[in-house]
Amino acid sequence: MSEKQSSEKLRNIIKDSISNQKRKTVTVLSSLLAVQDSLHYIPDEAVEEISIHCKVTINDVWSVASFYTNFRFTPPGEKTLDVCWGPSCHINGAQKLIRQAHDELDIKGEGESRDNKVTLRYSTCLGACAQSPVFAIDHKMYGKLNKSKVTNIIEKLKK
Ligand code: FES
């Protein structure tokens, strides 16, 4: 697919997300949420399209988008690894395992691996404390983790 085609495709997804909102009042915020739901991030093109659709300036859209920390402006990795550092997981050794995940994925803190295959995110509780320590790949839980289980998870992610 050429760059022009993929840019057109992206704009079409954005336009559909904005115009297919099932709420009575379409706002800048609701449109940002709709785009983030379908693309998992807010590209520059979305800011332009929302500004056109909502008849506001690009700066107005940016001021709403940048106010909320849940919006991301770069594409996420193909898979998401949530690592829990909540109290139960912490007590059961999560810190070491999180460090191991960082090392094996070559990611510092939260963010994407260099090949953009993985986004690592911190969680304060994945809701499975009895299984701690817990990680999740695309919301699928992996509990009672230890060093070798984490290595297996990371290998799965790298495929
Ligand atoms: S604290 Fe880790 S799952 Fe609850």
Image (spheres, rainbow, N blue to C red):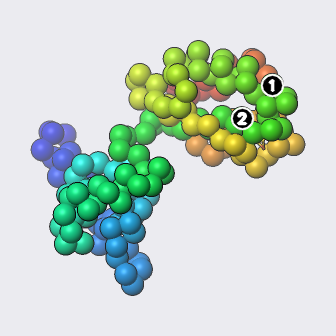
Residue 159 visible in the shown view: yes
Residue 143 visible in the shown view: no
Q: Quadrant of ligand 1?
A: top right
Q: In the rendering, at what x and y percent does residue 79 appear?
A: 51, 37
Q: Residue at x 85, y 30 (%)?
A: 91
List the single residue furthest toward the bottom. 24
Q: Quadrant of residue 37?
A: bottom left
Q: Is residue 86 left or right of residue 32?
A: right
Residue position for label 1: 93
Q: Is residue 29 left or right of residue 104?
A: left
Q: Secondary structure at mark 2?
A: loop
Which amino acid is tagged 1? Gly
Pick the residue in front: 1 or 23: 23
Pick the residue in front: 24 or 137: 24
Q: Pointer 1: residues within 10 angstroms few (<14), some, or many (20+)?
A: some
Q: Residue at x 41, y 22 (%)?
A: 114
Q: Pointer 2: residues within 10 angstroms few (<14), some, or many (20+)?
A: many
155, above or below 87, in the image: above
Q: Is the CB of mark 2 within 8 Å of ligand 1?
A: yes
Residue position for label 2: 85
List the single residue furthest toward the left. 4
Q: Residue at x 46, y 30 (%)?
A: 112
